[in-house]
Amino acid sequence: MEKKILVAVDGSTYSNNAVHYLGSLFSQQPEVKVHLLSLISCSSLPPGKEWMDELELMNCLGPEAQKKLRSAKTYMKSATAKFERLGLSPERITTEVRLAKQAIGIDIVNEARQGLFDALVIGRRGLTKLEELVMGSISEVILKKCHDLPIWIIDGKVDSSKFLVPIDGSFCSMMAVDHLAHILQDSKDCKITLFHSSAMLSSAGSITPPDFYEQWGRQWCEEHMSRPDSLFHAPKQLLVDNGIPADNISWLHTSKGIEASRQILRQALIDDYGTIVIGRRGKDIKKGIFRGVSDRVVLMGEQVAIWIVG
């Protein structure tokens, strides 16, 4: 099954990190295809620009915007060449450079939805995590606006192909596992650790089969979610059902520490996990004074790729 990944790029080091990560991770998975999108903002465009076609927009460009456009097209050639050096064949790579009709973050989310992409990839900019929240970076806008599509945030140059997947039996954590199983379907090289933290401020992990009947059917849920070890067994079975070898999947439980998000990041650092795959609750669910665990992982995560699955 083809997997389509949308990659928002701007020619920066952070975009290069995203290209490096994807090329290294998916070079041997021919069904994974990437679409590089670069959006150029132009404050000089007239009111009503969102209704103008591309040719009309181009005719309104000033010298500075034209320079940005040329740079973006040059970068696309460089990024494509890098993908090819990492092992992606040219037919797996498409590129697009165009003007933003609205705010760049909103345009990116709209493109991801309309193109029916499996995931949206963004490289985190070189701001501190607090500055990102206060200043409203593009990545923060995307995270706030897009709860219906998996978002992959790449921080730094990530080389490890090991995956850490926090689980607690909730619907959002199981959907994160389901997304990983879909993306890595039939992969024989990946190493995945299902991780549960029962730290002081964490919720107790449990899984309730009827909550998942609609998603995977009653028979599957009763078989794999009614066992004493279902918290681990059910997500592992999802991965195995998608062709991932059982020997490549391990289980880790810790009760140390006070808060789950810190334990997740600590474990990723200690054991050199390149990617954290984590579910997040819906935008309408109250998260309390400490925010959600996924919010805090994104806020504090450094030198790691974080897949956020709503």
Image (cartoon, rainbow, N blue to C red):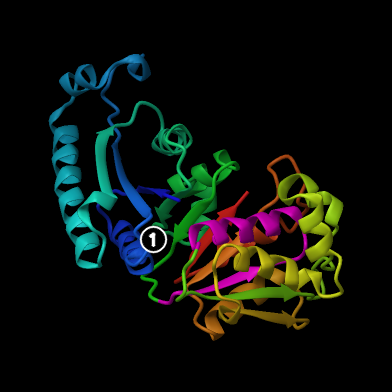
Taking the magenta stretch, the answer to whether it contains residue 77 is no
The residue drawn where x is 80% and y is 55% is 219
Coordinates of residue 227 in the picture (x, y in percent): 85, 71
- Residue 265 or residue 211, whichever sits in front: 211
Residue name at image x 41 percent, y 52 percent: 122
Q: Determine whether, in the image, residue 85 is placed left or right of residue 278.
A: left
Give above or below for 3 relative to 14. Answer: above
Q: Secondary structure at mark 1?
A: loop
Q: Residue at x 34, y 59 (%)?
A: 30
Judge the density around disc 1: few (<14), some (14-19), many (≥20) Cα neighbours within 10 Å.
few
In-image side of 154 versus 271 (left or right): left
Q: Is residue 169 magenta?
A: yes
Q: Is residue 165 left or right of residue 21?
A: right
Query: Residue 115 at x, y = what percent?
Result: 42, 35
Determine the image quadrant of residue 235: bottom right
Horizontal and vertical percent position of residue 16: 28, 61
Which residue carries the number 1 mark?
Answer: 126
Q: Nearer the viewer, residue 302 or 154?
A: 154
**Which amino acid, mark 1?**
Gly
Q: Start and end of the magenta stretch?
A: 160-185
